[in-house]
Image (spheres, helix red, strand yellow):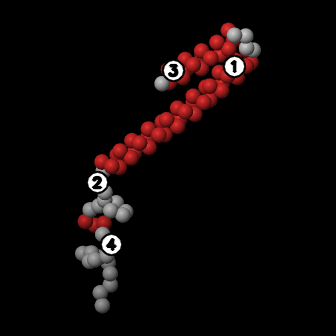
Amino acid sequence: MVRWAAFSCALVPAVLLWYGASPAGATGAALGLAAVTAACRVLLRQSERGAARLRAEERAPHRGRHQRTGTGAHRGGRHPGGTTPVS
């Protein structure tokens, strides 16, 4: 798709010049097309990253509210060898 965008960014000004448009107008059209192409490319990449992130989250198992794992991750309870004072 990027190849077609680059091709059109080069072709449109050439056609405009062929049909008698001013060089400034052809340059403006080329810059406008390049800006739109760059913006679309950025948006497409963001969309692809978001879709990949969603697919990765769907595959990963759900680990609870705060995604804590392991036996020492629970709050409260007794902790052997703690430093609490004894009465």
Q: Toward which corner of the image does residue 13 lie, by quadrant?
A: top right
Q: Is residue 26 left or right of residue 4?
A: right
Closer mark to the observer between disc 1 and disc 3: 3
Q: Residues within 10 Å of mark 4 (few under 14, many from 20)?
A: few
| Residue at the spot of label 1 | 27
Kind of residue at badge 3: Trp
Q: Which SS class for mark 2?
A: loop
Q: Residue at x 31, y 59 (%)?
A: 63
Discs 4/2, front: 2
Quick check: marks 4 and 1 in contact, CB under 8 Å?
no
Residue type marked 1:
Thr
Tell me if mark 3 has few (under 14), some (14-19) or many (20+) residues whose alpha carbon lies within 10 angstroms of its own. Answer: few
Specify which label sits upstream in the sequence, 3 or 4. 3
What residue is shown with label 2?
A: 61
Mark with earlier residue (4, 1): 1
Q: Amino acid at mark 4?
A: Arg
**Which type of secondary structure does the marked residue at label 4 adopt?**
loop
Label 1, residues with CA under 10 Å away: few <14, some 14-19, many ≥20: some
In the image, residue 59 sits, relative to residue 47, either above or below, namely below
Q: Name the secondary structure under disc 1.
A: helix
The dot on residue 75 is 4
Instruction: Using the numbered discs, state the Cα–Cα distance from disc 1 to disc 3 in whole angstroms.
Output: 18 Å
The x, y position of residue 32, in whole percent, is 65, 26
How many dots with numbers?
4
Tag 2: Cα neighbours inside 10 Å, few (<14), some, or many (≥20)? few
- Of mark 2 and mark 3, the one earlier in the sequence is 3
Q: Amino acid at mark 2?
A: Pro
Q: Quadrant of the C terminus?
A: bottom left
Q: Which mark is residue 41?
A: none
Which residue bears the numbered disc 3?
4
Residue at x 24% of width, y 75% of height: 80
User: Judging from the image, what secondary structure is the residue with disc 3 in?
Assistant: helix
